[in-house]
Image (cartoon, rainbow, N blue to C red):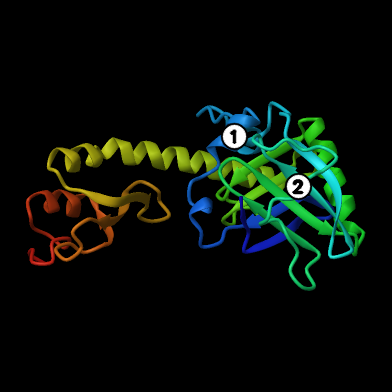
Amino acid sequence: MRRSSETSWLEDKGFIGVSMKPDFTAEHEFGIKDIYHSFEISHPEEMVGIERRRIKANPEGLVLKEMTIDKNSVHCLVFSPYMHFDKKFVRPQELSLYREETLSSAWDERSFGVIVSDDPKTGLKNLKKLHAAFEKKDIAIWLGGGGSLFSGPGLSIGIISAIPYHHRKTMEDADKDNFNLRKAAEGTGIKDKLSAANKKYFALSPRWKDDQKKEVIFWLNPMEQNNNNCGWFEVADLLKWIEGTGPIPKKGEK
């Protein structure tokens, strides 16, 4: 578990949840697949929107605890499947409050924690609402994306019944668009063609070329960057790369 760069409450005419922005650390680069597994969050293609992110289990390892740090009373909502919490609750070292902070968090691919001081009282009230929602399985957990107010990078936890309809609809639309984009990208067959030609890369990420959403372009981060350019390229450019021409090879034809 590593400390978030910024922690904030998610709100829209009332409390919704918490957002934990990533820091420049490896633990925030691995996704949250173990958290999904622990809470039995599956992602079937036919399911979109907030229901795609709903927890289906309430596993052991989620606790709401009071403790004292530097003579100050604080509360922690923590989930870790590999820590056994008892009366001698041990706070993960990364879960701390700096200086005048009243809210902070930490997380990695398998665990998370939110810590608040008793001042302001809102912090403890929000943690209690989250904890109660977990018990009712009225919680959604997601990592970035979603195309809504809650689409910033990092780990987000929200109370489903508190999320307004327009945010749910925006998330559903974004999921449908991502599904269509992925299918369009797969339809080009470009990954298989590059693999067959032994063209290697660190990333090949699709996006729509324009608002018509009919043609896909790709962000290429190639290996051997002394010989190849990175950037956004059309499928035709990637096919030329296979032949050693086009805008990707640094010595290819322009």
Q: Which residue is mark 2?
A: 90
Against 135, is 182 above or below? below
Looking at this rendering, what residue extends furthest in the front direction?
Answer: 88
Q: Type of residue at label 1?
A: Tyr
Q: Secondary structure at mark 1?
A: helix
Determine the residue positioned at 68% across, 43% down. 168
Residue 164 appears in the figure: no
Looking at this rendering, what residue extends furthest in the right direction?
Answer: 121
Q: Secondary structure at mark 2?
A: loop
Determine the residue positioned at 70% across, 26% down. 57
Image quarter where the C terminus lies is bottom left
**Left or right placement of residue 36 versus residue 8 in this view:** left
Q: Nearer the viewer, residue 219 or 56?
A: 56
Q: Sequence-wise, which precedes: disc 1 or disc 2?
A: 1
Q: Residues within 10 Å of mark 1 (few under 14, many from 20)?
A: many
In the rendered image, residue 109, in percent from the top left (x then y), is placed at 56, 43
Determine the residue positioned at 13% across, 53% down. 241
Q: Which residue is mark 1?
A: 36
